[in-house]
Amino acid sequence: MDAAAELVGLVGVGILLSALFLQSESFVGPLVRGIALQSLLLGVLLGWLAWSQQNLDLALLAALAVAVRAVFIPWVLDRQIRAFRWRLREVHAAQRVTSHALAAIALAIVAWFVFQETLAGIFPQPGGALPFVLLVEGLLMLATRGNTIVQVIGYLEEENAVVYAGALFAPHFPLFVEVVVFLDVLGVVLVGVILSIQRDVTGTLEQGGLEELAG
C-alpha cells in the first residue's frame, strides 16, 4: 500500500472513530463539536483526493464540507445551545449511553464484514468499507436518538457518509456536486426549522435532568 492510500485510510479511521464518539456522547455540545471534527476530517480527505487526482469537483466538495458542515452549521447549533441556561442533554441519556456505544461498536463490526462479503469485489478501493460503516452509524443515530438537534447531527453524518462514498467510488459521477449542494441546503433548512421552534423541540435540563446529572 502506497503512502497516499495509507493517508486516505488513516483519515478514514479518524472519521470512523468520530462516529463512534458521537454514539457514546449524550451532551449536545460535544456532539456538535464532534460532527464538526468529522466534517473537517472529511474535508481534509476530499482535499487530498482532489489534489492527487486533479479533480476540481472534489476540491469544491472539500470546501463545502469545511464551510457548511464543519463551520457554519456547527456554529449555528452552538449558538443555539449557548442561548439556553443549561447545557442540553438528551432526556434519560445516562441510562442509554453505554448501550448506544456497545451497539455502535457491534454494528460497525457487522457492517464491515457485510461489506467485505458482499461489496468488496465491486468496490475494491482501500478503505472502501469505511463510508459504508459510517452510513450505518448515521442510521443508528437517527433511529435511536430522540433529541432533535442530535437527529440533525445524525443527518449530517449520513451526508458525510454519502459524500465519502461518492468521492471514493464515483468521483466523476454526473450531478454528484449538485446532489451534495442540495443535501447541504436541506441541512441548513433543517437547522433553520429547529431555530424557529427552539425550546419546544429541544427542551432544557429541568429539575429531573439535574437530579440525573447528580446521580
Image (cartoon, rainbow, N blue to C red):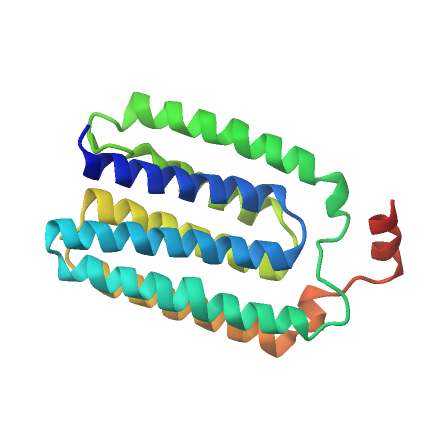
In percent of width and height, residue 211 lies at 89, 52
Q: In the orientation shown, which residue stands out farthest toward the left?
A: 54
Q: Is residue 152 in sight in this rendering?
A: yes
In percent of width and height, residue 40 lies at 39, 56
Q: Which residue occupies 89% across, 60% down?
A: 207
Q: Is residue 107 above or below residue 155?
A: above
Q: Which residue occupies 16% across, 54% down?
A: 51
Q: Which quadrant of the view contains residue 180? A: bottom left
Q: In the orientation shown, which residue stands out farthest toward the bottom?
A: 196
Q: Is residue 122 left or right of residue 132?
A: left
Q: Which residue occupies 43% across, 51% down?
A: 38
In percent of width and height, residue 27 lies at 67, 54
Q: Nearer the viewer, residue 38 or 136?
A: 38
Q: Which residue occupies 60% across, 73% down?
A: 79
Quadrant of the image containing the C terminus? top right
Q: Nearer the viewer, residue 25 or 196?
A: 25
Q: Which quadrant of the view contains residue 70? A: bottom left
In percent of width and height, residue 178 lies at 24, 65
Q: Nearer the viewer, residue 208 or 70?
A: 70
Q: Is residue 89 above or below residue 189?
A: above
Q: In the orientation shown, which residue stands out farthest toward the front?
A: 3
Q: Which quadrant of the view contains residue 136? A: top left
What is the count of numbered marks? Answer: 0
Q: Is residue 173 in sight in this rendering?
A: no
Quadrant of the image containing the N terminus? top left
Q: Is residue 142 left or right of residue 165?
A: right
